[in-house]
Amino acid sequence: MDRGCRKENVAVDKRVREAGLRPTRQRIALADLLFAKGDRHLSAEELHEEAQAAGVPVSLATVYNALHQFTQAGLLRILAVEGSKTYFDTNTSDHHHFYIEGENRIFDIANGPVTVTNLPEPPEGMEIANVDIVVRLRPKRRE
């Protein structure tokens, strides 16, 4: 293992620990795959495919469990886009998304003019955590 890879694994290990999770070998391997490429949106199936390609022996159920644990720990943000299609976003800041229908592709809307007004008052004892906006796109229809 080269020095850069070892240093990167230590950083991922620390990030997982600081989120309050035990840094198991599988969690570290999955976190490394998730966070090594910057901000991205992945489904559990896509991460599972990446893990298999990287030689990480992990089941799809373990990938789902790890993603939900990372989400609860604040390392990921969950985006429910298409009924049963769920994406996990490594960028946990407040931001919104474009979704291209038919391509199952999602990407961030650059900081800009998205505003939400007239939100309802939350029920007693509750507060609004965030508002997710997904703008669905499709190719223009030819006339």
Image (cartoon, rainbow, N blue to C red):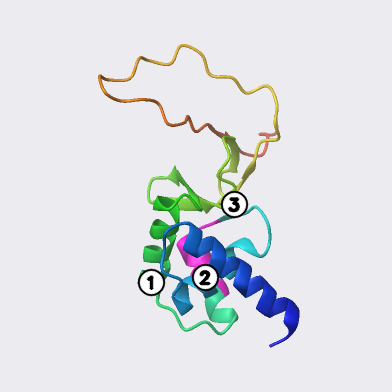
Quadrant position of the N terminus in the picture: bottom right
Distance between the alpha carbons at the discs numbered 3 and 1: 26 Å
The residue positioned 55% from the left and 65% from the top of the image is 14
Is 28 on the left or on the right of 72, as rendered?
right
Q: Residue furthest top?
A: 118
Marks 1 and 2 sit apart, C-alpha to C-alpha, by 10 Å
Instruction: Please tell me whether residue 84 is drawn above or below residue 55 in the rendered image.
Output: above
Mark 3 to mark 2 CA distance (whole Å):
25 Å
The disc label shown at residue 30, or none: 2
Q: Residue at x 64, y 41 (%)?
A: 108
Q: Helix, strand or loop at disc 1?
A: helix
By secondary structure, the bulk of the magenta-drawn segment is best described as helix
Name the secondary structure under disc 2.
helix
Q: Which residues are magenta?
A: 42-50
Which structural element holds mark 3?
A: loop
Residue 85, position as x, y percentages in the image: 43, 52
Q: Relative to 83, does residue 137 appear above or below in the rendering?
A: above
Q: Is residue 47 magenta?
A: yes
Q: Quadrant of the C terminus?
A: top right
Which residue was labeled with disc 1? 62
Residue that numbered label 3 is attached to: 103
Query: Which of the two discs, 1 and 2, labels the residue nearer the N terminus?
Result: 2
For residue 27, say whether it is visible: yes
